[in-house]
Image (spheres, rainbow, N blue to C red):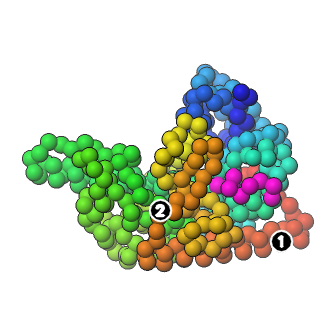
Amino acid sequence: MAPLRVVITGGAGQIAYSLIPLIARGLVFGPDVKVHLRLLDIPPAANALAGVAMEVQDSLFSTALEGVLATTNDVEAFTGAQVAILLGGFPRRPGMERWDLIGKNAGIMKRMGELLETYASPNCKVVVVANPAQTNCYILSIYAPSLPRKNITSLSRLDHDRMIGMLLHEANSRLISASAANGTECVRRLTAADVRGACVWGNHSNSQVPDVSAVEFFVDGRWVPIESVIPDTTWLGLANSLPGGGSIGGGAEGQSLVEAVRKRGAAVLGARKLSSAMSAANAIAEHLSDWLSPEKSEHSPAVSMGVTTDGNPFGVSEGIFSSLPVRCTLGGDWNYDEGFSLNDDVRRHLEASVAELEDEKATALKMLEKAEAAAGSVTGLVPRPSL
């Protein structure tokens, strides 16, 4: 079998640096799938990109890596690409509004769409990480009209994983404390496999809707409702979190779970002075593995993915891209998970997030029209997403 041709934009950046070993060890597409990596970045990053290629060579990856190409030529990188991981985007800088970021990235995503349309495989699978991720998907879909819209996805798995991690931390703390108080044998620590029913809806922004209303934990050999392990409904619920991202009380340090998830990227940035890289790379790997790995189970659990809303059963307006619950199927396809329902709180917050996505879509289109009218086409890539 010919190697899978995978292009990574922003190839000299932090997320790529953490993602490449996961792919090269066969942890993403499966150990039996050989991969040829094309690492793309802008000319000012050429030296750093060459250094990454040296490290790949020095790491003696043999499980899945067939070869690596480090280039600043976007046509060379995208030619024949079967998977595109779009990390490259204009980063949000101090003083920039989200709308400024949309304008900067709309031109970049236009170029990415043109490359996908002209040079990539007709069935190329795409995951967009550069922000605003869902709106960037919409721009891609305009300029790569031949590419099935179901092939264009964005990363909401990082938000999903952040929520699961926080739930596990709280659940294990409570279970261990209860065990110690009762003088019983210490319970088995819960892992991600012991959580089901979680979803993140809407935009990858402060309007996102982390939803735990259907979450269950696997405790003592059976699935139990989340409230039986974490009874603090104020911390769990959306009722104390405003749709725009503000908090009106509840939870540890005055912050609900919803707000903690929404603000996790900023918290990491504040602590590291760098944006999320390791966790983002891991989430990309999980996203692609669930979607494209031939080894996944037919009964894979529902996951959160940024996907087209066309034909969705949740009442979300069509013609945009949004994080929704899906089930990936064998063969690289996915379907909406119709087992999820929206309670009143979730629906109210999701409507606010969808309204934001509609505004972003309109803004991006205006920016593109203005740029085209001025003949100021953006053809380059600039790193790196801010997560």
Q: Magenta residues, as a range?
A: 145-153
Q: Nearer the viewer, residue 93 or 185?
A: 185
Distance, label 1 to label 2, CA atoms, is: 40 Å
Residue at 35 percent across and 45 percent down: it is: 191
Quarter of image, res 57: top right
> Residue under circle 1?
369
Residue at 78 percent across and 37 percent down: it is: 71
**Residue 307 visible (yes or no):** yes
Give the crowd class for mark 2: few <14, some 14-19, many >=20 residues within 10 Å. Answer: few
Above-or-below relation of 381 to 103: above
Q: Earlier in the sequence, mark 1 or mark 2?
A: 2
Quarter of image, res 80: top right
Residue at 58 percent across and 39 percent down: it is: 293
Q: Which mark is residue 339?
A: 2
Q: Nearer the viewer, residue 61 or 301?
A: 301
Give the crowd class for mark 1: few <14, some 14-19, many >=20 residues within 10 Å. Answer: few
